[in-house]
Image (spheres, grey):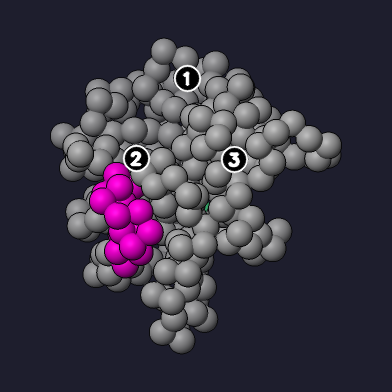
Amino acid sequence: MGARKPLIAGNWKMFGRNADLAEIGALAETTGPAAAKIEVLICPPAVLIAPAAWQARGKSILIGGQDCSPSAADAARTGEISAAMLADAGARYVIVGHSERRQNHKETDDLVRQKAEAAIAAGLTPIVCVGETQAERAAGQVAEVVGRQVKASAPGQGGAFVVAYEPVWAIGGNSTPTLAEIGEVHALIRETLAGQFGAQANETRILYGGSVGPKNAGEIFTVPGVDGALVGRASLKASDFSAIILGHPAAV
Ligand code: PEP
């Protein structure tokens, strides 16, 4: 197996309009030379996926969704978007089980796994998010919570997905775990995947997410076992996001 290619993914959440798609062109211009070594992904809101994919055509930026239906087949599910529809619109990846969906939409590990499997069936690569809350960290339950989430949310097909370790308390704020803590949880996730998928687990990329920005990305990327990042706020502007990407050791 070759080395895992780093992946740096931007989650635009419920931000962005057509006019903001110009950021994709600007991002491609600055990060294009690094594209052979680093995969760059933007996950805009669902209504912008098709125009974003059009904007990114012929460029080094990949487009992804932020969620998908657990139903692989077309179905009577008002308001839902299937993974096949995302793929048809030009997506290559989809985020599943983001903590905002686990918390606000009561998504369970089992539902997240079904979504990840539907994504794979549609030819997409799911990015499965896991991470502990502040209370769980304070109670010393990080390994238990994250281990359980990985085991129960990972799709059956080892290697065909990405895991994003996103401590819930680090999202949208200014604090992150220490580099040592990030390294510990990434090692735990890799060990858990190895228990499930054997040697195939070496192919799964594990991203860190939660308050990654141009100032701290470089040091986070040096942590052993960190294969890239999932970035929220700092992915909205090409200037910030490209600074993060160009701060990766593989970019130089
Ligand atoms: C996220 O929501 O996935 C995220 C990491 O957000 P932020 O980078 O803004 O903390």
Q: Is residue 43 above or below residue 198?
A: above
Residue bearing mark 1: 56
Q: Is residue 122 left or right of residue 235?
A: right
Q: Earlier in the sequence, mark 2 or mark 3?
A: 2
Side (left or right) of 51 relative to 246: right
Please report the residue visible at 30 percent of the width from the left and 47 percent of the height from the top.
200
Please state the extent of the stretch shown in magenta in the rendering.
Answer: 188-205
Mark pair 3, 1: CA separation: 25 Å
The answer to whether marks 3 and 1 mark residues whose Cβ atoms lie closer than 8 Å is no
Q: Position of residue 224 (x, y in %)?
A: 20, 57
Kind of residue sitting beneath label 3: Ala
Q: Amino acid at mark 2?
A: Leu
Give the mark nearest the N terminus, 3 or 1. Answer: 1
Quarter location, residue 72: top right
Residue found at the far top of this picture: 58
**Circle 3 residues within 10 Å: few <14, some 14–19, many ≥20:** many
Residue 7 numbered mark, or none:
2
Cα gap from disc 2 to disc 1, whole angstroms: 17 Å
Asked if the magenta segment contains residue 200, the reply would be yes
